């Protein structure tokens, strides 16, 4: 089974002038590290300079929305990629955090008037997460999509915010 990735890129985007923040959770670290690696790899492919990729961490996915807001204020970045991995357990915890984090990240874009990428995996099993981080062989790393998405959102829409 293949996991779908970003569709065909619709233009040529040059990220050489943009600043990108990555804030990642530390839960499920192996998966997070692979996703962050994929995002950075793709940002560099789109010419984002290493010194313009600012990385910070938070304990867990629940902390991502607030820290994402802080990333804009602390580092003057054009876009933030919050990266987290939520894996369903035996309680309702997963549902509450997925809902809170996704809706808060969506809202934040309109509050701060800057793009926020949705870099949070919401997986029913660890296997799903391993696949989406391309730790399982032959699978697609979603972090790469998030990196490309960040560059496109700034290059295409900056000036229209
Ligand atoms: C508590 C918790 C649990 C059970 N599962 C995850 C998870 O799968 N992924 C994740 O990023 N964080 C998890 N957390 C931690 C919460 O996101 C948060 O850090 C704590 O509840 C403290 O606010």
Image (tube, rainbow, N blue to C red):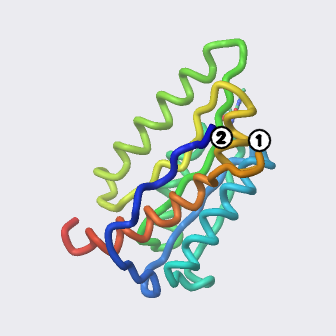
Q: Residue at x 69, y 39 (%)?
A: 129
Query: Where is residue 26 shown, x and y percent of the image?
Result: 74, 47
Which of 22/30 is in front?
Answer: 30
Looking at the rendered image, the quarter that the C terminus falls into is: bottom left
> Is the CB of the residue bearing disc 1 within 8 angstroms of ligand 1?
yes
Give the residue at the far top of this rendering.
91
For marks 2 and 1 on the same chain, the one whose residue lies earlier in the sequence: 1
> Is the CB of the residue bearing disc 2 within 8 angstroms of ligand 1?
yes
Ligand 1 is found in which quarter of the picture?
top right
Q: Secondary structure at mark 2?
A: strand
Give the residue at the far right of this rendering.
30
Q: CA distance from mark 2 to mark 1?
A: 6 Å
Q: Residue at x 55, y 73 (%)?
A: 43
Which of 54/48 is in front?
Answer: 48
Q: Are marks 2 and 1 in contact (CB under 8 Å)?
A: yes
Label number found at residue 28: 1
- From the viewer's perspective, is residue 13 above or below residue 108? below
The quadrant holding residue 113 is bottom left
The quadrant holding residue 132 is top right
Looking at the rendered image, the quarter that the N terminus falls into is: top right
Which of 92/34 is in front?
Answer: 34
Label 2, on which residue? 85
* Label 2 Cα neighbours within 10 Å, binned few <14 / some 14-19 / many ≥20: many
Query: Where is residue 103 shown, x and y percent of the image?
Result: 40, 35
Q: Secondary structure at mark 1?
A: loop
Q: Is residue 122 left or right of residue 13?
A: right
- From the viewer's perspective, is residue 37 above or below residue 45? above
Q: Residue at x 58, y 62 (%)?
A: 22
- From the viewer's perspective, is residue 91 above or below residue 82? above
Query: Where is residue 70 shown, x and y percent of the image?
Result: 51, 58
């Amino acid at each position: 089974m293949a996991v779908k990735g970003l569709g065909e890129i619709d233009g040529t985007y040059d990220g050489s002038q943009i600043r990108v923040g990555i804030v990642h959770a530390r839960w499920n670290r192996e998966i997070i590290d692979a996703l962050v690696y994929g995002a950075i790899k793709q940002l560099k492919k789109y010419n984002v300079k290493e010194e313009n990729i600012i990385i910070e961490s938070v304990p867990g996915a629940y902390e991502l929305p607030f820290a994402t807001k802080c990333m804009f204020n602390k580092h003057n970045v054009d876009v933030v990629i919050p990266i987290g991995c939520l894996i369903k357990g035996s309680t309702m915890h997963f549902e509450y955090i997925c809902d809170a984090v996704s809706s808060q990240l969506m809202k934040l874009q309109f509050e701060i008037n800057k793009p926020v990428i949705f870099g949070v995996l919401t997986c029913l099993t660890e296997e799903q997460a391993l696949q989406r981080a391309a730790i399982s062989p032959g699978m697609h790393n979603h972090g790469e999509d998030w990196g490309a998405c960040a560059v496109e959102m700034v290059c295409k829409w900056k000036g229209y915010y």
